[in-house]
Image (cartoon, grey):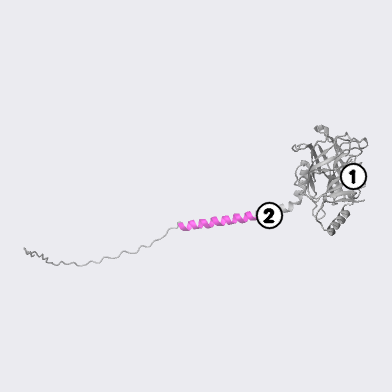
Amino acid sequence: MVILSIPIFNFSLNRLISSIMFLVVLFSAPHFSLSLSNKPYFDPNLVLIGDAKFTNNSFSIQLTDPKNSSPSSGFVIQKKPIKFLSSNSRPKRPLSFSTEFSFSISPHNGDGMAFLLVSRKFMRKFSKESFGVSKESPFFAVEYDTFSDENLGDVNSNHVGIDVGSLLSVKTSNVSSINLVLNSGAKLHSWIDYDSSSKRLEVRLTKSGLSRPYNPLLVYRIDLGDMWRSGEVFVGLGSSSGNSMQTSNVYSWKFKTRSVPKWLHSQPADPRVFSDVRSEEKGENKRWVCVLGFLSGLIMMIGCGALIAIVIVFMWAIYENSRETVVTIPAKCTVQPGDFKYQKIDVVINDNSVDVKH
């Protein structure tokens, strides 16, 4: 029986029925609920499967509920799948991702919690045990294990492990080495970074509220692009209580992907891989380097020719201005001799008393 739990909104009856039919076809899980509202510390469009549910205050997601179901198993998943190799791009650029989340596990010996990459088959065959995964569908997991299973070669009941298609971890790290206990009930914070160019995955873990550790707790080399090819992959966090009363809560979760050129990558990075990939890129770009070199040389030759022409014109102008200028001075006007003569002039001054005459 399929049980759907959807928040109440003012939808019309036809739209509500259409939405339910779409969700049933898309996710054929035993139980799931869909959150349509954004939560402050979570990515939007999350799908809750199994016993997973938002707590009463809506500030965290409780993945397991052993009081109502035993064994209990829950899963929170990103609604939109990802592809590690895009079939539409040429050349294919592998996908890298970074994720971080805060969580707590109650003090019981359950299975703990896991970060999971699963196929669409997982949605149709979700189980109540072992984080909901099965051997019938491929998966990749980073498990935060709080149960020591000798059949799976667990080092102890307080470790982080890498699982590839099997719950038998290919690599583990003891959490006690960094003075932490996974199922202490305290809030913890974890970072998982995968770089597709170096094919390197790093896991970091610390108490919630502290800064990101510089040194990773666990490092593992894996080609997720080769594992998943261009198939759709769903990303999620899962937990199962086993035969205990263990509960797991998630308080925040962010997941980001990035697709960059092979020669350009960020931490984590392997310098040796970077050198090899960079050499391949140089071979691919050799033709473009030759073309750019030819164009640069041609532009330089044209510039030098123009400069020489300007210098020649400038020198010619200086030469022309320095030539002696001949100025023609007109001849002076000739002076002709002239005749002069004198004439006697009588001046008469009238006075009332004296007459003077010259």
Residue 284 part of the magenta segment: no
Q: Earlier in the sequence, mark 2 or mark 1?
A: 1
| 320 left or right, relative to 287 | left
* Above or below 6: residue 214: above
Dominant secondary structure (helix, strand or loop) of the stretch shown in magenta: helix
Q: How many marks?
A: 2
321 or 135, which is in the foreground? 135
Residue 302 part of the magenta segment: yes
| 250 left or right, relative to 69 | left
Question: Can residue 197 be seen by looking at this rendering?
Answer: no
* Helix, strand or loop status at disc 1: helix
Point out the frontmost of discs 2 and 1.
Answer: 1
Identified by mark 1, the residue type is Gly
Q: Which residues are magenta?
A: 298-321
270 or 121, which is in the foreground? 121
Residue at the image point whose x is 74% and y is 51% from the top: 286
- Gap in Å between the C-alphas at discs 2 and 1? 61 Å
> 10 Å neighbourhood of mark 2: few (<14), some, or many (≥20)?
few
Name the mark on residue 294.
2
Q: Position of residue 115 (x, y in %)?
A: 84, 43
Q: Quadrant of the C terminus?
A: bottom left
| 355 left or right, relative to 238 | left
Identified by mark 2, the residue type is Phe
* Above or below 162: residue 122: below
| 189 left or right, relative to 132 | left
* Helix, strand or loop status at disc 2: helix
Q: Position of residue 44 (x, y in %)?
A: 78, 49
Name the mark on residue 132.
1
Q: Position of residue 334 (x, y in %)?
A: 28, 65
* Above or below 307: residue 127: above
